[in-house]
Amino acid sequence: MFIALNTDKSEGDVETQIVIPLLTNGEMLGIPSDCIRSKEHLRPIDIDKGSSKRKGYYPDFSIYLNALPVCIIEAKSPINDVEGGYREAALYALELNKKFESGVNPCQCLIATNGVHIHAGPWDGEATIKCHVGDLTIGSKVLTELQELVGMSTLLSLANHTNAQIRLEKFKRPFNQGEGPTLINSSVGNNSFAADLSPILRRYFTSHGQQEGPEIWEKAYIASKEVTTYDKALESYLKERISTAKSAGKKLLSPTKSREASLEGAIRRYDSERPVDGALQLVTGSVGAGKSLFARRYKEQLQPPEISTKCHWAFLNVNDAPPKLENLREWVCQEFVKSIQKEGAPIDLEDAETQEKVFSANLRARKAYYDRMNKSSDGRGNLEEARDIEQWRQDPEISTMAIARYLHGDKGDNIVVVFDNVDRRNAEEQLVCFQLALWFMAQTRALVILSMRDVTYELYKNEPPLDTYKSGTVFHISPPRFIDVVKRRLELSLEAIDAEIPDQVSYSLQSGMQVKYDGKRAADFLRAVYEEIFERPRNVSKIIEALAARNVRQSLDMFLSILTSGHMTEDDLTRVSMSPRNARLSEYTLIKILMRGDSRFYNSTSGVIANLFHCDSNWKRPSNLICVEILYWLIGKRKAKGDNGHMGYFAVSHIAQALEKVGFVPEDVLGACEFLVANALIEPDTLSLVNLERNDCVKVTASGFIHMRILSERIEYLSSVLPTTAINDDRFSDKIFDAMRTENATGRLSLSRRLTLTRQLGEYLSSQRKELRRHDGYSAQLKTGADYIIGHIEAAVNNFTKDKPGTRPTQQDFLDTI
């Protein structure tokens, strides 16, 4: 199959004409191309000794399986000696293997060729196969021997053997023993203090139906000029989500208390031009940015009177659409017919006179038929007419077109249809909704306002179907800060407390004793909690802002969970409610609430905080550091142009290949990325929370940053994640479970016990880092995610040592500089 190359050929010719075909051809060695790494994948290493020492050498190719370099391939030009190439490959393999324990040698095989001869054999001995390249013909003995030595099946067997030697085994979650499963699923409920306040709190601090109540869109809306700024480091993460808001063709919506000029202008143009195919207006913003609330507020409060009298609105909540977006046209027509009547359009399809007006064009089209029926039998035409009207009324699409024709055509009014909550769907579904909006717009001549996630628009604006909107102006909504929203809702709730709370309020202490106090002091409690979170110089507000990721809905839910949490002890409640000026809610308590929600212990479904040390025992090579390394890598790349052309977005396959160099198996990296996506620590460009593919691009979120930057240095976080963290150290696992039982019995784990567990976590992770350093790529890293996180764990412990009470390192954190 191969022809020996002439001496005028280069090393590159040997690589393309001999090495690549030999490795990848199914009738040769059959090695998949995605297992072959070029010289850029390996680190240059000094090999040999004495005067013959070669500095910065790396081979031309390597074969990686299970994140292990199982075979080294060296290519030389035809004028060079193949023996020298084989020797260099052997020396490089020696440097790779000697980092591992005795008997563990991941790099087992070598291949060297100069385009004329090929040598192959073990890493620690002479070549066992030496032949002319022309001898490698299909079915030849020498090819069979080469396949048995370095064919794909052999290499995979060697890789699996080495993986079994270095794989950490017996990972288990500490809670998964004894009564642990019952404890981990137990709950604490709400605190007794919040019982009397609960109706008011839920009215103002729950995300459900927040745009429906007039009190919310009249009094609680945050105008653009009222939005404050974020902490500098956090700002860069949250702001990047809307960094394209001021790009070409985009206009930032700036509602005031009385008007919003941009949307008003769009409606006026639609009214004056009356386009025969209708009009479409895109509104972008992050999930929970307030697009729904803005649309409702504009319709109810900001429309100028002369526009309001001519505009008939309908709101179609895509949250209620069929799960797989099936039969969407029928669904959107059904919702339109219901909504436009509900929103006050002058039509009632149950009224006979209105039916005749709405379906007048349909009736005219069948007038000749009705006349013939009346001639054949007196009144028969009238009966047929009544039957047709009822049939049309029952058909959503016919009713939709008739209503649109009546309002827009006969009356000369405007129809404005809001496709709401489209942004809560994944990217593919948002594009389907965009196409649906185009169809509906053309059929009804309506002005369609469609909300879309800002990320979706930026990623797909130059591709079908969004490229059809290139000439249109996109409106963008910048979400208010959580602190601003909560402050406004707090003002409303205080008014309600003054009006609704009884004169005396009581709650129970653990001892059973009843505490009674002036009901009006409940307002002091709310103010104290707000001030504790937002007005003291601390990090809790940053944590909440990052976890919510500018999602106002989620922000409100988090604040409500803090106010009602059963993890806020009666002592906390008494101190805050009775002495608000001197009260302090510990950061420990607030993080505990955010982590555990209404569960007694932190678990995978409690709270809004994720476990950085997540590990799946079914991974090929489990590690508690893989999620940390992925986040650290993405944070370091967040300002770089990504694989999809957008800043910070990199393909999962790219991340996997980068982490493969440092010892993580690509399949495990994909599994870890799926976990990080599901927990909103990274965000895929598809915006889907399931079915993450290797070619999908992801970027780190503000939540991912805050987990690494702040939570990883908090004792409460570090000790609370341990019971559900898969660990392969039985003694450490037993200590965690024992601490869990103690906390269940006493209600709280002492600081000294939590410090001990945190210190042991640092030691446990350090042992895994030591194993990773055996991989050449990992040991070559100046700083790794493991180094960073272990440093934070040590700082968390040192913060409470006797010689440094209450102090933290003052130097700038590395992640703040990236």
Image (cartoon, rainbow, N blue to C red):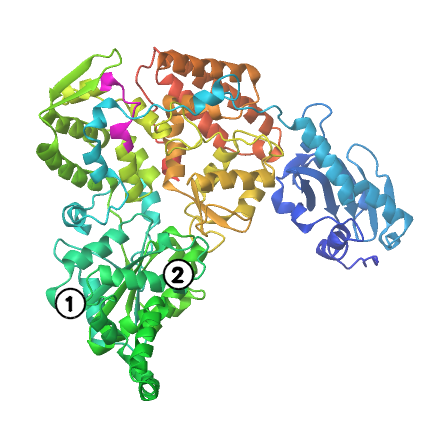
- When the figure is inspected, residue 694 is found, relative to residue 173, above or below; the finding is below
Q: Is residue 423 left or right of residue 174?
A: left
Query: Tag 2: Cα neighbours inside 10 Å, few (<14), some, or many (≥20)?
Result: many
Residue 232 in the image: x percent, y percent?
29, 40
| Residue drawn at the location 23% of the way across and 49% of the way down | 211
Label 1 amino acid? Ile
In 3D space, how far apart are the residues under numbered discs 1 and 2 (Cα atoms)?
27 Å
Label 2 amino acid? Cys
Give the magenta part as a residue range.
Answer: 561-572
- When the figure is inspected, residue 282 is found, relative to residue 362, above or below; the finding is above
Q: Which residue is mark 2?
A: 433
- When the figure is inspected, residue 10 is found, relative to residue 59, above or below; the finding is below
Q: Which mark is residue 307?
A: 1
Circle 2: element type: helix
Circle 1: element type: helix
Residue 123 in the image: x percent, y percent?
77, 35
